Amino acid sequence: MDQIDVPGAPSVPALHKEYVDRGGRFFACPVCIKTHGLEGAALVEGAEVKGAPAVYEFAEGGALTFNY
């Protein structure tokens, strides 16, 4: 994240911290984690490995955005 730099914009680490500080969470797809051999890898702050059912439950019927 530290390598991304856009002049005049907040840093990615600063945006990440603000998102987490405001209660934001990241969900990592368990199939993707396994496919890429990342089981047991350290995740960024606020990230959890969660499958689709847990994500839908978290959304409580609200809008979802998936990013791969």
Image (cartoon, rainbow, N blue to C red):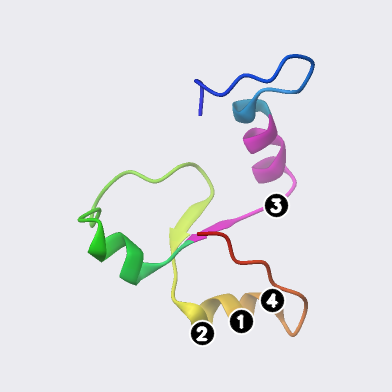
Which is nearer the N-term, disc 3 or disc 1? 3
Q: Amino acid at mark 4?
A: Ala
Q: Amino acid at mark 3?
A: Gly
Q: Position of residue 2 (x, y in %)?
A: 51, 22
x 35%, y 69%: residue: 30
Tally the numbered discs. Answer: 4
**Mark 3 surroundings within 10 Å by alpha-carbon count, few (fewer than 14), some (14 through 19), many (20 or more):** few
Q: Position of residue 60 (x, y in %)?
A: 72, 82
Q: Give the labeled residue for mark 2.
A: 53
Identity of the residue furthest to the top in this view: 7
Q: Give the labeled residue for mark 1.
A: 56
**Is 31 placed above or below 10 here?**
below
Residue contact between numbered discs 1 and 2, judged by CB atoms under 8 Å = yes
Q: Give the labeled residue for mark 4.
A: 59
- Of circles 2 and 3, the one toward us is 2
Residue contact between numbered discs 4 and 2, judged by CB atoms under 8 Å = no
Q: Position of residue 44 (x, y in %)?
A: 46, 42
Q: Nearer the viewer, residue 22 or 63?
A: 63
Q: How far apart, in angstroms, are the residues tagged by discs 4 and 1?
A: 5 Å
Q: Amino acid at mark 2?
A: Pro
Q: How far apart, in angstroms, are the residues tagged by discs 4 and 3?
A: 13 Å
**Is 44 placed above or below 54 here?**
above
Image: magenta residue range:
15-27
